Image (cartoon, grey):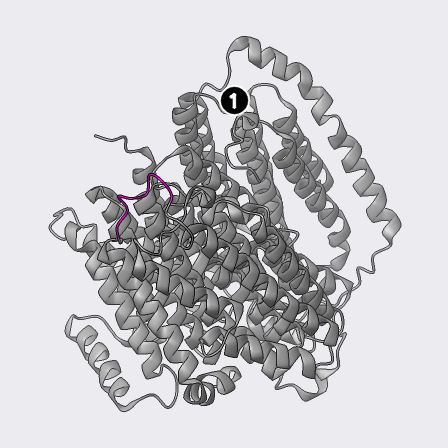
């Protein structure tokens, strides 16, 4: 429970988040986009557990992490469902082909 | 020990981003989940670690693998062409990560903080979850119902 | 008692989905009955000093639960609370959900789709009720996700190409914003030892009870970083410039009833309300926070109005108009005064009313004409008189013309800006009101006035399910506008307390 653990874990959390975000931004395939979102979620879970560990509130942090995991699995399931529906509609999963809505 | 685990997890995540086939990417993600489980166990969170293992390394991998098998994104020629450009698109990532490390090191963030003293040091997760945070449980129930509903809506073809 | 607002829709949801399937056709009407009930509950008074008949209802619900064998004290175990801001939000949620359900009945033809739509709207209402009733940051996240998941499915309900793409864009932006908010929550947990509103407020020295902790700037650097992360996530969710990229696509791609819900209340609850709570209860609006809010708000006002001017798609223009109005709310919040807060909350309510009404009218026009391109329309006022009149009143309220309700909320916002000394921002807000009038009048000219275009002769007034909500919402706008002294005293001024 010493704050000296924070720099090491904090650094790796930030690196994980950057990796996930980069994957979301740089990919053309929708499924890899979801994988990038999952990596970001792992980073955030690690951060919450770390926060609880460093402040001594392990029980609270675990409860938050469990809730977070349950919610994220539902979100990923719905996103995967939408990706499958897009595939069935369009026949491919290339993000460059989806320019219907002009930003 | 912690450093090894953290580096291994980061490498697994990087492999998930870089690898050519989606299936290997999903497996790399599962590997990262397993490593996160061990890290969480090291950080004295056994219950959350078990949840992470069974749900993320298990359920989500199943979801991804079934999504991948239900969709065949590109023909073989396109896969090869796309993969060739892959390195050109992703080369920036390790550079970016190195820059982040250097940047954080030079920023000299004042990371001093005094953690507050915990009152309920002996509290159990189950106690916290059921007695102190019942609204979160209610939210979980609602979102699971909504998710099931959504999967039915999204997958049902016009009969 | 407050937990019933989440439990009753849950009960309805379970009842509607039982395997017997006998209640399938009643999904829409049951939803409508519930939201009307919620509207009455909020007006009647939820917290202390409610109307006399509220006591009777509370006791009645409690004894009904006891009759069925459950312990009604279980309901009291949920840490929910309702103050003035919450009451306003609950009322707005109920009214917009009513409009959305009615429009859904009117525009969705397939029975099974109607059933899905009604169920998902119930889930969204549950999620939004949860957001405004809890007093803990992580629980806010939980219910934001509930409302968001239901919204994702709703946008993709018809599984058309546009809807699926809009839903995916919304999912990605929402997930990124959620990741930022969760990182901030993790940091708050580390620094403050808890995620409740009071814990975080103590971290920033904003606790109202602890007198000696009232000095500002108590938070270490990490705390400020966490606050910045959370604010960034909320800006994305509210659709403020420059994080507004997903909003027009999502609003436009959604089916008609869903656009009413999205534009009217979902973004406001998941984004703007959380921002109000964060800034007012936890961060304290002084210094950097206040000026950031003022700047981002004013930029959104102007950018939203300018972008709305050049649109040719009806719903897209309404989406950009939403961005502009949210800018007003944030700028008013940025002043940090009680009047600013009152103006912001009042404008959230008014915006819910007039923006959802505009989307209802857009749905009526789209259904009758068959397209959303305003350049192809003209002269509809003769053929669709009800829609034409109600849309005129809605836009007058949006632009802030007396005696409609929008005028009063804009006036409060401008007064708050003036009193706080931000005169330049106030002037920009006034000029943007003129811009608002401009783009709406241009829309009216293109769609409703002028000569009737060829090919539109067969158009007639929309079905009752699309005009009734518009009329109801217009009546509410006019009523609030005319009865402003009464409304001001009982609802607006005590918005912070109760």
> In the displayed structure, would residue C367 be above or below residue B30?
below
- Residue C190 seen in the figure: no
Crowding at mark 1 (Cα within 10 Å: few <14, some 14-19, many 20+): some
Q: What secondary structure predominates along the stretch shown in magenta?
A: loop
Q: Secondary structure at mark 1?
A: helix
Query: Magenta span has C19?
Result: no
The N terminus of chain C lies in quadrant: bottom left
Q: Numbered disc 1: what chain?
A: B
Magenta region: C453-460
As drawn, the residue found furthest toward the top would be B77
Q: Nearer the viewer, residue C428 or C322?
A: C428
Between residue C338 and residue B43, name the one nearer to us.
C338
**Which residue lies at the image location 17% right of the left edge and 71% below the top edge?**
C69
- Residue C185 visible from this viewpoint: yes
Q: Residue at x 22, y 70 (%)?
A: C70
Residue B42 is situated, as x and y percent measured from the top left of the image, at 62, 47
Horizontally, residue B62 falls left or right of residue C387, namely right
Q: How many marks?
A: 1
Query: Residue farthest to the front?
Result: C451
Q: Residue at x 33, y 65 (%)?
A: C6
Q: Is residue C299 left or right of residue C114?
A: right
Residue C461 vs residue A4, the one in the foreground: C461
Question: Residue C65 is drawn in which quadrant?
Answer: bottom left
Residue wearing tag 1: B23
Q: Residue A92, position in %: x, y? A: 47, 21
Q: Position of residue B53 (x, y in %)?
A: 49, 40
Q: Identify the residue at horizontal 54%, vertical 47% (top origin).
A: C311
Whole-percent x, y for residue C332 in the image: 62, 73
């Amino acid at each position: 429970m010493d704050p000296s653990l924070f720099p090491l874990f904090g650094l790796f959390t930030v690196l994980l988040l950057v990796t996930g975000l980069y994957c979301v931004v740089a990919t053309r395939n929708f499924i890899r986009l979801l994988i990038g979102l999952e990596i970001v979620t792992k980073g955030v879970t690690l951060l919450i557990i770390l926060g609880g560990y460093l402040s001594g509130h392990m029980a609270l942090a675990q409860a938050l992490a469990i809730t977070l995991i349950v919610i994220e699995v539902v979100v990923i399931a719905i996103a995967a469902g939408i990706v499958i529906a897009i595939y069935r509609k369009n026949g491919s999963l290339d993000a460059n082909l989806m320019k219907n809505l002009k930003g | 020990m912690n450093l090894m685990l953290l580096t291994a997890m980061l490498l697994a995540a990087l492999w998930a981003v870089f690898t050519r086939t989606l299936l290997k990417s999903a497996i790399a993600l599962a590997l990262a989940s397993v490593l996160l489980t061990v890290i969480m166990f090291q950080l004295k969170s056994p219950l959350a670690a078990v949840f992470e293992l069974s749900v993320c390394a298990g359920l989500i991998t199943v979801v991804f693998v079934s999504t991948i098998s239900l969709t065949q994104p590109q023909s073989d020629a396109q896969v090869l062409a796309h993969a060739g450009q892959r390195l050109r698109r992703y080369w920036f990532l390790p550079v970016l990560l190195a820059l982040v490390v250097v940047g954080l090191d030079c920023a000299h963030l004042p990371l001093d903080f005094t953690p507050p003293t915990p009152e309920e040091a002996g509290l159990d997760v189950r106690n916290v979850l059921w007695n102190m945070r019942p609204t979160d449980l209610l939210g979980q129930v609602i979102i699971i119902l909504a998710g099931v509903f959504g999967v039915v809506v999204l997958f049902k073809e016009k009969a | 008692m407050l937990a019933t607002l989440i439990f009753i829709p849950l009960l309805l949801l379970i009842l509607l989905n039982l395997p017997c399937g006998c209640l399938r056709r009643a999904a829409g009407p049951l939803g409508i009955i519930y939201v009307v009930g919620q509207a009455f509950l909020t007006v009647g008074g939820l917290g202390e000093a409610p109307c006399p008949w509220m006591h009777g209802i509370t006791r009645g619900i409690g004894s009904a639960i006891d009759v069925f064998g459950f312990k009604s004290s279980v309901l009291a175990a949920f840490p929910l609370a309702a103050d003035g801001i919450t009451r306003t939000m609950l009322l707005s949620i109920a009214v917009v959900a009513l409009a959305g359900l009615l429009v859904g009945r009117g525009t969705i033809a397939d029975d099974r789709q109607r059933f899905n739509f009604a169920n998902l709207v119930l889930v969204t209402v549950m999620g939004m009720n949860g957001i405004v009733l809890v007093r803990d940051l992580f629980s806010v996240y939980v219910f934001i996700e509930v409302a968001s998941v239901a919204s994702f499915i709703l946008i993709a309900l018809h599984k058309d190409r546009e809807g699926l793409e809009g839903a995916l864009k919304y999912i990605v932006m929402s997930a990124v914003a959620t990741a930022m908010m969760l990182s901030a929550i993790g940091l708050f947990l580390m620094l403050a030892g808890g995620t409740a509103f009071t814990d975080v407020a103590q971290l920033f020295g904003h606790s109202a009870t602890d007198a000696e902790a009232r000095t500002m700037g108590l938070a270490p650097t990490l705390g400020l970083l966490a606050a910045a992360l959370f604010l960034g996530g909320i800006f994305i969710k509210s659709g403020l410039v420059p994080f507004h990229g997903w909003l027009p696509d999502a609003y436009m791609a959604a089916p008609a009833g869903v656009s009413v819900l999205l534009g009217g209340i979902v973004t406001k609850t998941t984004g703007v309300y959380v921002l109000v709570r964060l800034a007012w209860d936890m961060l304290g609006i002084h210094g950097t926070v206040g000026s950031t809010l003022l700047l981002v708000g004013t930029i959104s006002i102007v950018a939203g109005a300018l972008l709305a001017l050049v649109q040719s798609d009806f719903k897209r223009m309404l989406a950009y108009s939403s961005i502009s109005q949210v800018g007003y709310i944030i700028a008013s919040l940025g002043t940090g005064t009680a009047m600013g807060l009152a103006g912001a909350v009042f404008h959230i309510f008014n915006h819910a009313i007039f923006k959802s009404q505009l989307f209802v009218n857009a749905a009526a026009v789209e259904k009758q004409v068959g397209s959303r391109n305003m350049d192809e329309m003209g002269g509809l006022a003769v053929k669709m008189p009800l829609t034409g009149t109600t849309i005129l009143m809605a836009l007058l309220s949006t632009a802030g013309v007396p005696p409609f309700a929008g005028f009063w909320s804009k006036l409060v916002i401008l007064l708050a800006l003036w009193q706080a000394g931000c005169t330049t921002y106030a002037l920009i807000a006034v000029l943007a009101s003129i811009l608002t009038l401009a783009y709406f009048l241009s829309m009216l000219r293109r769609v409703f006035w002028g000569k009737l275009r060829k090919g539109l002769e067969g158009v007639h007034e929309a079905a009752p399910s699309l005009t009734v909500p518009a009329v109801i919402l217009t009546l509410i706008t006019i009523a609030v506008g005319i009865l402003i002294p009464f409304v001001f005293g009982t609802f607006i001024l005590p918005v912070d307390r109760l």
